[in-house]
Image (cartoon, coloured by chain):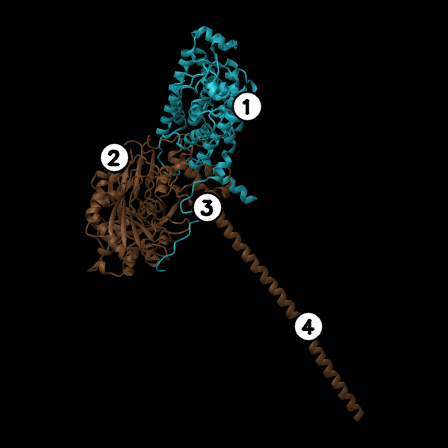
Amino acid sequence: MSTAGTSSARAGSGLTAAVIASPHAHGGNSVSATMFRVKMALVPATLFSFWLFGWPSFFLWALTILSCLCFEALSLRLMGSRRIKATLLDGSALLTGWLLALSLPPWAPWWVAVLGGLIAIVIGKQVFGGIGQNVFNPAMVARVALLVSFPLPLTQWVTPLPLSPVAGPDFVHSLRQFLTSAPLPDAMVSASVLGYTKTELSRGIDLLHSLSSASAPALSWLGERSGSFGESASLLILGGGLYLLARGIISWHTPFSVLAGVAIPAAIGHQLDPAHYLSATTHLLSGAALLGAFFIATDYVTSPNTGSGQIVFGLGIGLLTWVIRTYGGYPEGMAFAVLLMNALTPVIDRLIKPRILGRDRKGKPLSIPETKES
Amino acid sequence: MGFMNLFKSIAGHDWGVHPADHKRPACDVQTRQLPVPPRVYLMLLQHVGAPARPVVLVGQKVKKGELIAAAHGNISAPLHASTSGTISAIDEITAPHASGLPGMAISIDTDGEEDWIETDIPSDPYALSPEDIAGRVASAGVVGLGGATFPSSVKLNLGRRSGIDTLIINGSECEPYLSCDDRLMRDKAAEIVSGIRLMLISTGAKVALAGIEDNKPEAIAAMQEAAAGFSEISVVPVPARYPMGSDRQLIIELSDREVPSDARAADVGVIVHNVGTAYAVHQAVCLGRPLIARLMTLNGGAAARPGNYEVPFGMLVSDLIAFSGGSKGDIAKLVMGGPMMGSVLPHARVPVVKGTGGILLLDAREAADSESEPCIRCGSCVSACPMGLLPLEMSARIRNEDMDAAVALGLADCIACGCCAYVCPSRIPLVQYFYHAKGDLYERQRAQLRGEATKKLALQRQERLQREAREKVEAAAKRKAQRAADAAAAAEAARLAAHDDAKQGETA
């Protein structure tokens, strides 16, 4: 017992002492710089979405982020942290708020933003011990909690303003819409492709008929479709994702396998029965497929830390998303799929480890080759 | 196979990092000589193995190159006077190590004569026997000059005994800021090639592959020219990537062989020697000159005249800085070695040793250290680790004092190259964690050995006591039996006597 005591005392002093060990150089990367680049990658899609959905979406975005920052500061204060300012400046809470806002319906009322921030930061992140400790993606925890608790406001989609027959509300009207949570004007209400086809299928109308009908929602690479606030502008999200890949912020493993996990079963299903299975393109352009693949599933904290692990993780998310969309009760399944695979991340990390140099996959030293002369 | 290679190129493990190398302009400046310092301090332990044993007395005059301490044990290296003068003391001085702990050293008050000993120059060094070459290398005190400081002759003999086929010459010099190997290859390529030839003879290897990082085109050109006449020596440019100079990585790069984690390079048929060592072997065998000085890079933002200097061993770092032109601005951090693996010096009054490849005078900007933040599990350290370890998982275990879990994750395979800490966005001092854990592990292993030894002794004592007790009992039993026998004999005698008496009585 006494040796354990002294060894822990020594450990404490050794680890908290000033850093003298090498290296004496640093690559210059930092948490805040990484978070900043992710936000830069989100800027084009976000700006485009403001244009698509007008002032209410801007209020939603701003209040969700503000809510996340406030709850982060409050949690840290309650826990007696001395690094409140530094933690807020690392940009992780801001990014969580940003991603949550992008995943919400564009005209969601103010309390969705506030409650979303509370759930994401307090329940999704701080109760686990703050940054780096959470098991589940905080933004998706909030998204799913809101969706199952308040299904109506969380599935109210609006027609993108450029496609809308009526003009978008001005600043004052938008603010009133946002703060009073008044019902959406009928002319603005729309459905997403996934929701629309699911409803039609349940009414016995197959895809061949429902998609060729005049009332079928639009689908577009540019983003002129109804859906969550930041998920529509497929090309811009893809561009942001490629920027992150090019800067080395994310690796190709997760996004590529998420998209493959959705597209492969979708293509097979569509090939076999186009009347009941949506095409791969429809799947990729709908819902949170692209945003999820490049920005949500790639969250460092909640995804595996090896490339092979990320492929398993990504394929799992893609496949689960397709299964939920196709067979489940909800039209969209990305958030559920991400959370389910988040839960599996520790297992994946336990089972899939990189091979140590000089050892085999099981960790046994490689055998020494027979030498010729000795 | 083609498919597997394609797959490897996509999924391949892009190990290591690409730090800014800061080698120029220091590497382009001609090598400079330094004046003889007033006193040199030669550490008795500046190699891997047992410390050398002094063979001189205080007050004795020594010539340059004279043996002052002999190798002691199988793995050790002798020490020679790096300049001429008088032995002034054999005592402790701060060792060139971050701990600031002292070590034994022989100090010489120099006389500035630079008076060399008589040297033994063989008529044809390349006709010497492999054993003779290794013997001359051993007595010249040559050790691995890449920083490992393992006695070179031991490696030469090991190579010969293991029947290796390839000699790998490490000219990669992957540490940023350092350029002493680069400078040596540019200026002394012919001598290095001569040393390589001697090492080939001594190890029995068929070919030598000299790997040089492609950020040193001048050195590659010079070495290729010098090696042109020798078909068994090839100069191979390797990609500049840290830690290319690490044995296991360079062996894979040049010979495509992977050293098993519990084996030595010789087990897969190769031996790695540094270019500086090849040069020292040439000096030792062809010129009979022991290893008493080497090239060192003086660099860093606070160095007034960055460049390469020929420095005698035992010179104080403070003298080296002063003689080379001093510092400019404040030295925020003084490092011996490169920035990736070098150690911080507690102060400048420490002597340079055989393993010193450079002294870095880092200014405040270079030494800037910011507070570390929590791990965000970004996995940068995992992709940077050249050994395929999970630094983030190991450090998490070490923080929780779970050393066994850290070992299970491969702590013992860590080469402390520093790639993980270099790329960490949270600036977690991962290498410090690993040093700490390895130290703790070493302590525990020692405690375990001690415990086992104590247990063995206790067991032996118990056995001895039992044996003694048993012997006592046996002796007692024996004595008792003896007594009984004696008594019986006495009784018998008495009976016989009584009988006799009776008889006598009867007869009487």
Residue type at mark 4 is Lys
Q: Colour of chain B?
A: brown
> Do the residues bearing badges 4 and 3 touch, measured as CB atoms within 8 Å?
no
Q: Say few, some or many: other residues with alpha carbon within 10 Å of mark 3 (under 14 / 14 to 19 / 20 or more).
A: some
Give above or below for B192 relative to A114: below
Q: Which residue is labeled 4 in the image?
A: B480
Residue type at mark 2 is Ala
Q: Pick whichever of labels 4 and 2 is earlier in the sequence.
A: 2
- The reply to whether label 2 and label 3 mark residues of one chain is no
**Whether residue B236 is visible:** yes
> Do the residues bearing badges 1 and 4 touch, measured as CB atoms within 8 Å?
no
Q: Nearer the viewer, residue B42 or A199?
A: A199
Question: Looking at the figure, which quarter contains the N terminus of chain A?
Answer: top right
Q: Which residue is labeled 2 in the image?
A: B304
Q: Say few, some or many: other residues with alpha carbon within 10 Å of mark 2 (under 14 / 14 to 19 / 20 or more).
A: some
Q: Nearer the viewer, residue A71 or B30?
A: A71
Residue type at mark 3 is Gly
Q: Which residue is labeled 3 in the image?
A: A363
Cα distance between the residues tagged 4 and 3? 65 Å
Residue type at mark 1 is Gly
Which label lies toward us, 2 or 3? Answer: 3
- The chain assigned the colour cyan in the figure is A
Query: Residue A248: x, y in percent?
Result: 37, 30
> Do the residues bearing badges 4 and 2 touch, measured as CB atoms within 8 Å?
no
Cα distance between the residues tagged 1 and 4? 98 Å
Cα distance between the residues tagged 2 and 3? 49 Å
Which label lies toward us, 3 or 1? Answer: 1
Cα distance between the residues tagged 2 and 1? 72 Å
Question: Which chain is home to disc 3?
Answer: A
What SS does tag 2 mark? loop
